[in-house]
Image (cartoon, rainbow, N blue to C red):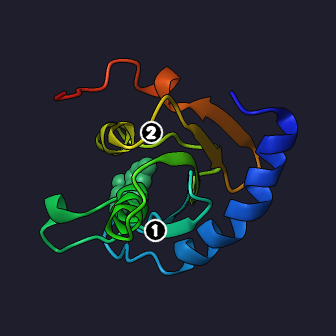
Amino acid sequence: MESRQNIEELVDRLLPAAQEAQRRAYAPYSEFHVGAALLTDGGKVFAGCNVENASYGLTVCAERVAAFKAVCEGERVFRAILLVSDSEEPVPPCGACLQVLAEFSGEDMTVISIGKGGEKAVYSLRELMPRAFKFR
Ligand code: THU
């Protein structure tokens, strides 16, 4: 688990990127706007927003957009992800996103969620997804 100071540093670095991405969320169906910012072990930040589709099941969450952008740029070990949403309370990533993050989380990673009211929740990925499916 990261120290309190590390969490603050992560929030300072990731929150502006997540908020900027949230403003670009494409969510005309749910009207629920989500932004995520992911920090890799290599020190790079990748942002994502949710992208919905008229065929609802094709929607992709903000966290997976950020994860896939990172992998596509050659970053395969994630240190932390921060998400912001329209929810008053902080929301954890959905199960599908937890499974995708687990693929690239190394030993573990930090998950920070901030609600509209400013409330902050800090989790470890292991705590949210203790039994992720791993093929090898
Ligand atoms: N969504 C995310 O982007 N991340 C989450 O962690 C939860 C849900 C999106 C998917 C959909 O566009 C909208 O929020 C409502 O479910």
State the separation of the CA atoms marked 1 and 2.
17 Å
Is label 2 within 8 A of ligand 1 (CB to nearest ligand atom)? Answer: no
Q: What's the residue at 56%, 79% (across, down)?
A: 23
- The image quadrant of residue 30 is bottom left
Label whose residue precedes the other's in the sequence (1 or 2): 1
Q: Callout 1, which amino acid?
A: Gly
Q: Callout 2, which amino acid?
A: Ser
- The image quadrant of residue 93 is top left
The percent coordinates of residue 65 (x first, y second) are 36, 65
Seen as rendered, the residue at the extreme bottom is 24
Ligand 1: quadrant of the figure: bottom left
Q: In the image, is 82 to the left or to the right of 55?
A: right
Q: What's the residue at 71%, 70% (across, down)?
A: 16
* Residue highlighted by disc 1: 48
* Residue highlighted by disc 2: 105
Q: In the image, is 9 to the left or to the right of 77?
A: right
CB contact under 8 Å: marks 1 and 2:
no
The percent coordinates of residue 74 (x first, y second) are 38, 65
Which of the pair 85/44 is nearer the observer? 44
